Amino acid sequence: INAEYGEIKTINTNYFIQTNLRTQALMTRISRQDGLNGKRNPFLDLPQNGKIMAYYMWIDGTGESMRGKTRTLDSKPSSCADLPMWNYDGSSTGQATGEDSDVLLIPVAIYKDPFRRGDNILVLCETYCPDNTPHPTNHRAKCQEKMKKVADEHPWFGIEQEYTMFDENGVHPYSWPLNGYPGPQGPYYCGVGADKVNGRKVVEAHYRACMYAGIKIAGSNAEVMPSQWEYQVGPCEGISMGDDLWVSRWILCRVAEEFNVVISFDPKPIKGDWNGAGCHTNISTQSMREPGGLAVIEAALEKFAQRHREHIEAYDPNKGEDNKRRLTGRHETASIDHFSHGVAHRGASVRIPRHVAQEGCGYFEDRRPSSNADPYAVTGRVIQTMLLDEFDDLPAPPQDNVLGLIAEDEEEEEEEYTADIQNITIEELDLDPELADMLARGMGGRRNLW
């Protein structure tokens, strides 16, 4: 057949390759199904005999992910004061060693459980060390201290949480072509139709679940890149901003489980000409919301400009390294190296909405936080710069090195010895072949180095 129909051979080969890939993807989904094949779990209707299931959740050592576990309560608590403290193995979450592994859980907020329903609850917890001091990864405690100091200013926040959906392997963007890319960005933002929007079922389920739980979700929309979405939480006052956003993230990931979808909060999940994902933070105080508040906003932005470096370090869990891939000056972002602001300017570090400029009061939007930012670190840094003036007394870095990753003397040394730096391949090192391959794998497949 191949000899007689040579022209058809290529077409059939491509067809069978694509069919085989789809079959593999389908078999993977089947192999990971829980046996109910989408049907409701019949055991969830069983009575609980007056007991309450409380799901304790906390932020782990990455500063990006949440962990959680369930315990039984004898009655429904009326406040966090009625909830018992608990603990967990911090050596399994990057927060302790095996020799001293217990990390304490202190309940700080209660939400209705949209999955178990009834009187069952979700319990957001802070992490504490055995000596009853906040764990080093506990940014909520530090944020709460700042919020108490400025309570009279009634700081409001609204955060726009962007995220990207992936297939259950966490590698391939959800519903993207198996052997290529979707069409260029343009028709997907706030779009409608199966050719423009992916994952709406997850979005709608998440929205309802947040409303049921008591989270102050304000809206949602499809984003510029296909399979990328955004939802908004707020306005929330003080510490509740971080509480609501963290629990909403957990609910999103938990909802996505039901659809075999993986949620990514990576700020630049797809390289190339695709938008990244942020956590734009809208900010106002009582004085900003009153007549003449625009002058207060402009004064705050002058402080922001002086502390651009500190904000960049607080705006992603890796002190700016994640945001370097996103804040490039392209794809509706400002450069990570410079602070800027403007009216209705989505390419600036901070945007002042046009209606705020016209009315002379309101709020402003800090567009720098990454999608995986800790909202406690973000809002705490904002309050510190804007209202407390508790600066870190660090020298201002040069404009082309905002993160301060290279010291000035190291930069001078690099200029002095630039001529001695060469680009060579692994093969030129004359290594054992097995060692050379190991080195290449450790470099992500690259075979050239400086």
Image: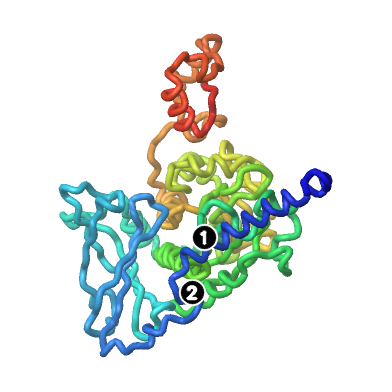
Percent position of residue 65, x then y = 40, 56
Element marked by disc 1:
helix
Q: Where 78 falls versus 435 (above or below)? A: below
Percent position of residue 408, x then y = 46, 22
* Residue 387 visible in the snapshot: no
Residue type pointed to by label 2: Cys
Please name whichever residue, 2 or 225, is drawn nearer the observer in this view of the structure. Answer: 2
* Residue 205 visible in the snapshot: yes
Please name whichever residue, 252 or 15, is drawn nearer the observer in this view of the structure. Answer: 15
Q: Residue at 51% of width from left, 41% of height from top?
A: 308
Q: Tell how many labels.
A: 2
Q: Residue at 39% of width from left, 60% of height from top?
A: 150
Please name whichever residue, 101 or 406, is drawn nearer the observer in this view of the structure. Answer: 101
Q: Residue at 49% of width from left, 80% of height from top?
A: 39
Residues under labels 1 and 2: Cα distance?
A: 30 Å
Residue type pointed to by label 1: Thr
Tell me how the rendering is colored: rainbow
Q: Residues within 10 Å of mark 2 (few under 14, many from 20)?
A: many
Please tell me the numbered disc located at residue 210: 2
Q: Residue 63 vs residue 99: left or right?
A: right
Q: Earlier in the sequence, mark 1 or mark 2?
A: 1
Percent position of residue 394, x then y = 40, 34
Q: Residue at 43% of width from left, 25% of height from top?
A: 434
Q: Circle 1 is placed at which residue position?
A: 28
Q: Residue 214 vs residue 228: left or right?
A: left
